[in-house]
């Protein structure tokens, strides 16, 4: 039988940080509410939860890096909403946020979950922020729980 490591989905004793951008706040506040809901409903203690707000999605990687370097949190959820209609530099903002967050998670070893919506329209963003297509913030928080648990398991002595 192979030894299989797979993280449980629980927020019990989990020290979680959420970095969330204010740009398109009518969407990102819904994502944040979804992430907090998931954390609490899975047994999380809000005293162990830190929320960090940035101006836009472009600033998420730097904030996440600063949070990761404190080593106070076992996982970080990054939330934002980049909407194509808003700007011609949509592609740059979207690409830099995902590239930056991917770099930070690998260099710090802290799981960072990508909960940034990249949408063609406001309607599409609304769908993914708690209406037709669920809430990406909720999903990202659940993924953070699993990854934090997985990292604990991988780090346990054999
Ligand atoms: N930031 C977002 O989070 N979403 C967007 O859709 C967006 N648009 O469209 O411009 C956006 N721009 C701001 C950017 O993230 C930075 O805050 C800004 O460029 C200052 O560095």
Image (tube, grey):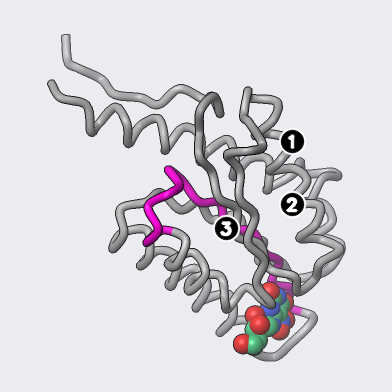
Residue 5, placed above or below residue 106: above
Residue 131, disc: none
- Which residue lies at the image location 49% right of the left edge and 64% below the top edge? 64
- Which residue lies at the image location 62% right of the left edge and 73% below the top edge? 57
Q: Looking at the image, do the residues carrying marks 2 and 3 touch, with CB atoms under 8 Å apart?
A: no
In percent of width and height, residue 149 lies at 40, 30
Q: CA distance from mark 2 to mark 3?
A: 10 Å
State the residue in front, 58 or 4.
58
- Which residue lies at the image location 17% right of the left edge and 15% below the top edge? 2
Lower sequence index among marks 2 and 3: 2
Relative side of 136 to 147, left or right? right
The residue beneath circle 2 is 31
Q: Quadrant of residue 88?
A: bottom right
Going by the picture, which residue comes out furthest to the top? 1
* Mark 2 element type: helix
Q: CA distance from mark 1 to mark 2?
A: 10 Å
Relative side of 31 to 154, left or right? right
Relative side of 43 to 106, left or right? right
Residue 37, disc: 1
The residue beneath circle 3 is 78
Instruction: Bin the neighbour count of mark 3 within 10 Å (Cα to Cα): few under 14, some 14-19, many 20 and up.
Output: many
State the residue in front, 73 or 9.
73
Lower sequence index among marks 1 and 3: 1
- What is the quadrant of the N terminus in the image? top left
Q: Which residues are magenta?
A: 68-84
Q: Looking at the image, do the residues carrying marks 1 and 2 touch, with CB atoms under 8 Å apart?
A: no
The magenta stretch spans residue 81: yes
In percent of width and height, residue 143 lies at 52, 38
């Amino acid at each position: 039988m192979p030894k299989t490591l797979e993280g449980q989905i629980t927020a019990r004793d989990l020290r979680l940080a959420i970095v969330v951008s204010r740009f398109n706040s009518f969407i990102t506040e819904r994502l944040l509410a979804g992430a907090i809901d998931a954390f609490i409903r899975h047994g999380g203690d809000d005293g162990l939860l830190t929320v960090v707000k940035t101006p836009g999605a472009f600033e998420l990687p730097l904030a996440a890096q600063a949070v990761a370097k404190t080593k106070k949190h076992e996982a970080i959820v990054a939330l934002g909403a980049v909407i194509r209609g808003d700007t011609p530099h949509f592609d740059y903002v979207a690409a830099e946020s995902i590239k930056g967050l991917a770099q930070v998670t690998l260099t710090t070893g802290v799981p960072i979950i990508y909960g940034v919506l990249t949408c063609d329209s406001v309607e599409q963003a609304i769908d993914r922020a708690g209406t037709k297509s669920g809430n990406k913030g909720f999903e990202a928080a659940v993924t953070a729980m699993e990854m934090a648990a997985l990292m604990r398991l991988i780090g346990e002595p054999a």
